[in-house]
Amino acid sequence: MAGCLNEKTSTFYFGFGRRDDEEEIGFVVLFPKVHHQLCDKSYLAASRYENLIMKDYVDLIARISIAFIFLYEAYDSIVFFHKTKETMTAYGITWNQDLLLIGVIFCLIVGSLLILIGYYASVGGFLILLYWIPFTFIVYSFWNDPIELRRESSLFFMRNMGTAAALMLLMANGAGKFSVKRIIHTLRLPEE
């Protein structure tokens, strides 16, 4: 929503966007004896700048949150290594459990750290997705569960798919402004 004040008519216009025929949708509010110009270019530029700053902070907070989810998953797999192997057996994963579990822990730790520091965050997201998507389809296969467990399993399945979507968004959009990769590329000296 944008607002502009017309000084000649002392009206304040709120616009909500455009329709298909490019006519602006909005409404007008009358303010008698108001002489401030709110619609100048510096005001609009400052508003866009504030939105970009907010986006950068949200990117950082989201990256930290995603990284800690999977760092905790790695920590849990390390601490309860034998119980995790028993769970793998219960789900029918019996082929080379040690190798698979160590590979999963490696993907989780490296992927989480890459996402956390923002250095090749898309690679980190891919490493985590290598684990997360098969895990979700194996553990929360609600279509194979009994009726009484189907609802709960489907909720966990959808939650995990939402987390996978967040990782895909991270892979598509990058780490954002507050990342080690951007700092390195900003501080790089020009070649002579």
Image: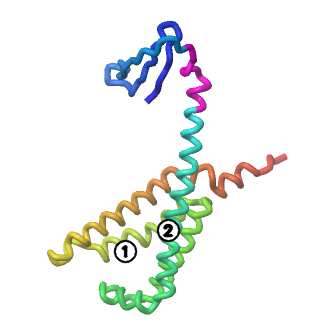
Q: Which residues are magenta?
A: 35-46
What crowding class fits label 2: few (fewer than 14 Cα within 10 Å), some (14-19), or many (20 or more)?
A: many
Residue 182 shows which numbered tag? none
**Earlier-in-chain disc, 1 versus 2:** 2
Q: Position of residue 39 (x, y in %)?
A: 54, 21
Q: Hey, what amino acid is under mark 1?
A: Phe
Q: How is the image coloured?
A: rainbow
Residue 38, compared with residue 131, is above or below; it is: above
Residue drawn at point x = 56 percent, y = 60 percent = 121
Give the distance between the C-alpha atoms of the residues marked 1 and 2, in whole angstroms: 13 Å
Residue 135, horizontal then vertical, whole percent: 37, 74
Question: What is the quadrant of residue 143 in the picture?
Answer: bottom left
Image vertical order of residue 81 relative to residue 27, above or below: below
Disc 1 designates what residue?
A: 135
Residue that appears at 47% across and 76% down: 73
Of the numbered discs in the image, which one, if any, rests on residue 127? 2
Quadrant hosting residue 88: bottom left
Q: Where in the figure is residue 62, as x and y percent of width and height?
A: 51, 57
Secondary structure under badge 1?
helix
Residue at 72%, 49% (x, y): give it: 186
